[in-house]
Amino acid sequence: MEGLGAAASVIAVVDLAAKVGSLCLEYSSAVKSARSDIERLRKHTDSLKITFDGARKLLQDPHGARLETSQKLHETLSDTYSQLDGIAERLEEKLRKGRRAKTMRRMGLRAFGWPFESKDVDKIIENLQRDQDSFAAALQIDQAVLQINQAALQIEQAAEISDINSKIDLTTLPVASNAAFDSHAEEHNARCHPDTRTKLLQQIREWADDPQAENIFWLNGMAGTGKSTISRTAATSFAEDGQLGASFFFKRGEGDRGKAGRVFSTIARQLVHKIPALVPSVREAIDADPDVHKKALRHQFEKLILQPLGSIHLATAIVIVIDALDECDGDEDVKTIIALLAQAKVVRSVRLRIFITSRPELPIRLGFKDVQGKYQGLALHRIPEQVVEQDISTFLAYELARIKKEYNGQVPLGWPGEDDIRTLAQMAVPLFIFAATVCRFVEDKGRSNPAKRLKKVLEYRTATRNSTLDKLDATYLPVLDQLTSGRTDQDKAEVLAEFRNVVGPIVLLAQPLSAPSLAQLLDVELEDIHALLNSLHSVLDTPSEENAPVRLFHLSFRDFLVDPTKRITNEFWINEAKYHKTLAERCIQLIGQCLKQDICDLKVPGKLRSEVNQQTINANLSPVVQYACQYWVHHLKESKYMIEDDDFVHTFLTSYLLHWLEALSLLGRLSDGVLFIRTLLHTAQPNITSNFIEFLKDAEKFIRSHGSIIERAPLQIYGSALVFSPTLSKVREQQWKKRLSFIKSAVGIKDHWDTHQQTLEGHSGYVMTVAFSPDGKMLASGSSDKTIRLWDTATGTHQQTLEGHSDYVMTVAFSPDGKTLASGSSDKTIRLWDTATGTHQQTLEGHSGYVMTVAFSPDGKTLASGSSDKTIRLWDTATGTHQQTLEGHSGYVMTVAFSPDGKTLASGSSDKTIRLWDTATGTHQQTLEGHSDYVMTVAFSPDGKTLASGSDDKTIRLWDTATGTHQQTLEGHSGYVMTVAFSPDGKTLASGSSDKTIRLWDTATGTHQQTLEGHSGYVMTVAFSPDGKTLASGSDDKTIRLWDTATGAHQQTLEGHSDYVRAVAFLPDGKMLASGSDDKTIRLWDTATGTYQQTLEGHSGYVMTVAFSPDGKTLASGSYDKTIRLWDTATGTHQQTLEGHSGYVRAVAFSPDGKTLASGSSDKTIRLWDTATGTHQQTLKGHSDYVKRQSDYVRAVAFSLDGNSGLDASRNLRPLGNALFVDGEWITRSGMNLLWLPPDYRATCTSVYDHALVLGHSSGQVTFFQIDST
């Protein structure tokens, strides 16, 4: 507690009191004989926690510094902490000594002894009460002082609150540029004429004002029916009346306007401007999480919109207008947005209304189907035709009259005439875009007079009688025919070719580009681009600003140009496949010309992407290069091109793969890399094996394995990603020359990709459970950190965190349709979550013990839960109501599973039995007996004929579900079997164990197929992906691992130790390395080649430390067996054993002359030995009993350089100067991160000699690096 302030000390005491209370609860359920003493101690620690927690709140108050008496109670706090720490240590030590420490900690299962007698508990409570009374008295004194100054404090607090509420840095909420209805980009876009759409606009107004109306109004209609014009008009009207809260006009291909990422931050920023009362809540959300705008859509919506609106009260309606939702990229994002907006109905204090327009496309229809009954809908194309025709006539009459006025006498009297207007309106119905395009064409000052242009349009009247596409002919051909009118055949051919070569790519672009960017991408002169665009102002929005993007006025122009049925009849027809291939080729050429290693000149190998500002990225990656990096694969796919060996795609990727991935990382799009590679694989000829296909498969593994660090630190693609890819990886072989210049060599890296695909890190506690979504695209994981995490299985990226449980998340399960996730917790509850939005739907309560397991019935209508209260409960998933309770087990229900037909439920228990139940009646059918220990897991085969059970007796049993007979026993694990799962085809069974391995078994024969190794802790859970190609495993090492089960990838055995490497040390000349391991051996290695030379055996315990003598002739090793051994390094022979320590030997060091050896031990002493004779010279004592846990032993010893200035015993030796150092997950030098270490290569010990760095690993392997000092 030394050096901590009062507030920090109190927090430490509160946390420790809570920990003791939690440990008491664990003992309470298992130790009946001491339950009274346990309960007394638990209640007192709870009382203590309440007292000190109250003190914490006061001390952390802005005026906590004024609590002078409480601030001075360091001695009392230290004494309380020391007592609680001792109690916790005793309780945990007893747990650790149980034969199943981690399983017992997980579930509180086994009966074990209580470490205190009643008189000990009496003394503990007496001492704690004394400290509690002292602190309570001090608080009373301080509270009296506070009361005296209360009035002054309230005035100060009011002033502070006022200041906070009035200020918020809105720049922390990024917005989508030009997304608001009144933005510059929308300024000149049309609004409804006052005499058009009157009934519809009135209907929208009445909906907004109706307190009983649904909170969403969905206006849908096909392309060109005027949806956006209505949106702008409605938004303008609501803004004028003070009711508009925010607006977001989507536009495909317009950067953030075409994506979902910034929709809610944009809306929130507008709402804050509109409603200042929202400032405190939004400010609180930003302060709590400055990156809130980067989180999942659900998190953004809740924190920035839903919760702030719920904190205020408004009498009038607030309207949010969202236009063209169909132009938002990502079908899942669209459905998520709809689902989230539907939840706005829960805000009762504000009448929130959301007006949405879109085309009636499938993802949107599905999204609204999921929120059926929560919205009001209207389809524009179902409005009576005569109403639409009248509105279009009104619009045309107004616009043509305005044009006539502008031309001032250049058109005939009476122009255009009622007949012409009527004809135009009939041609247009139901497309308002026809009327708008005609008016722009007629008005174009670069052409002949308006009367002639209108006459040209009217010539197409017959083409509008049959279909909407024919109406598009009449809309656009009058504009385009002007390009070729009056030209010779040769000129006409040239114009058409120029049109297709420029306009073709423009209409096919995934997002619009400026004229200069188009010129660069298409390799066309900028003047030629401008010349053509000047003729197309009626159909293309060509801005006056040079760097602004060229846009289509309407997507129907693209539909008109690429319609395959018009290939013969439309001379302007664009061959979509041809020009997509052109764009793909030009993108690839541009990337090759512009990209290079370290494109943004970061220089620092470990510089994080988050530390690079957007201006730097934009300065080095121009808009057109950014476009090329992100969309070349899209264009290649759309071109229907089939890749092959040595083609332009193969040549590009073998040369520029790493540069391209670096750029994607800088652009925040690396997660798309795997999807891009998979897309390319799908463009190959089926059933063809080629060098290029093998390269692509290797590239996919490369990105999946290293994506997390490449995404965080882009330059590590040339560092960690290359170094730690298998030596025979095709990407590594081809790209090795591009590694970071300081990396000279790396030895000890595996040769092949193994079945392990990637490691997902993020949980701060044990991973207790994992489950795949039914479509295999999402993985859910539950942890002892009380959270559930959702992951993208393609990239391994974390999508969102679900928070709400107050204790361990023991189990998760997806509903069959994937829309709901159920989670069970040791907080005794089950929670149901919406997987699209991450929102909590409901909590199911009823169990009186931990919820150990949950499972959905195949039809998704029933949820089964098993608990430590020895019961199974069945729940109605629609209503959350409890249906029935199944009783019969005499121990904890550890696992439940439904049969594939949903008629049978299997349950496994700590009573060592499996029970089968009829789900319709809840009756017990039969009991399966045979295991000799807890049944931890059960699973039905896909055909329902076989049940697999895993047990703490280290076996898996297979049972015939029809008869209940035991079929076979699978043996092989050396630890408890914690989890089993069948592959989707039923041919393979996976089992995870406390022996840290996963085993795959042939279910037909029961033979063991392979063992998957890599976890450093118990394997708590396994799950197959729906296609059976990927296996996910979760462990109490806090990680999730994904394994490739389909390929049977080669798993090699690397030469090395068979267990944890504890220590490594270089020979003084650097030519040899010694390593000590938990396998009780020392190994000697040639550092030049990394090859193993010999093994030194003799210790009977872990080898904790090794050191060479200054002359290199002798090696000393210290062990868990409490001895030091001296070895001849030339021959490997054992010379002598030094005995005397009463604890394990943690450190050894030779004096500079080699005559004396110092050893440090967990017995808290240092011993000095004569190396020539092995005799003990003296013992150095000084460490006291007060040193706690990790630091209660001597961890390191070192002599001064002259050997006479003393001996240093310390815990942490930091590098000096330019030395290499391993700092957690990084190899560093001079404080600079150089090389990131993947989980499998994290060091348990290190040694440095000159430019050589050696790492020992928990796997028993040793890795050698040569790293340049420059």
Image (tube, grey):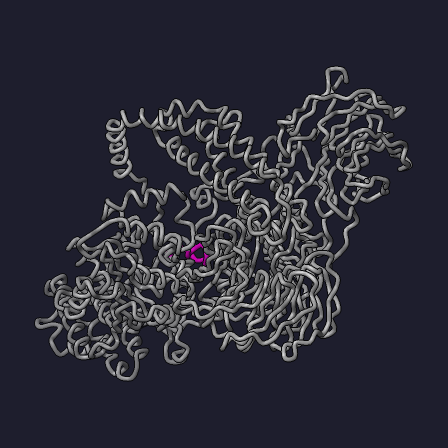
Q: Residue at x 23, y 48 (%)?
A: 274
Residue toward you, 208 or 806: 806
Residue toward you, 716 or 484: 716
Residue 412 % position (x, y): 11, 71
Quadrant in which the C terminus appears:
top right
What main secondary structure does the magenta stretch of the protein show? helix
Residue toward you, 524 or 427: 427
Residue 249 % position (x, y): 30, 59
* Residue 638 to residue 1221: above or below: below
Residue toward you, 913 or 443: 913
Residue 32 % position (x, y): 58, 50
**Quick check: can you spot residue 619?**
yes
In this figure, what is the number of numbered marks?
Answer: 0
Q: Does the magenta stretch include residue 521?
A: yes
Residue 1199 % position (x, y): 74, 22
Q: Residue at x 39, y 42 (%)?
A: 288
* Residue 1133 to residue 473: above or below: above
Q: Quadrant of residue 685?
A: bottom right
Q: Is residue 1209 magenta?
A: no
For the record, the magenta segment spans 518-527
* Residue 1013 to residue 1208: above or below: below
Q: Quadrant of residue 474?
A: bottom left
| Left or right: residue 611 compared with residue 998 | left
| Left or right: residue 454 compared with residue 364 | left
Q: In which quarter of the image is residue 907?
A: bottom right
Q: Residue at x 12, y 68 (%)?
A: 195
**Quick check: can you spot residue 433?**
no
| Left or right: residue 400 compared with residue 74 | left
In this view, the residue farthest toward the left is 413
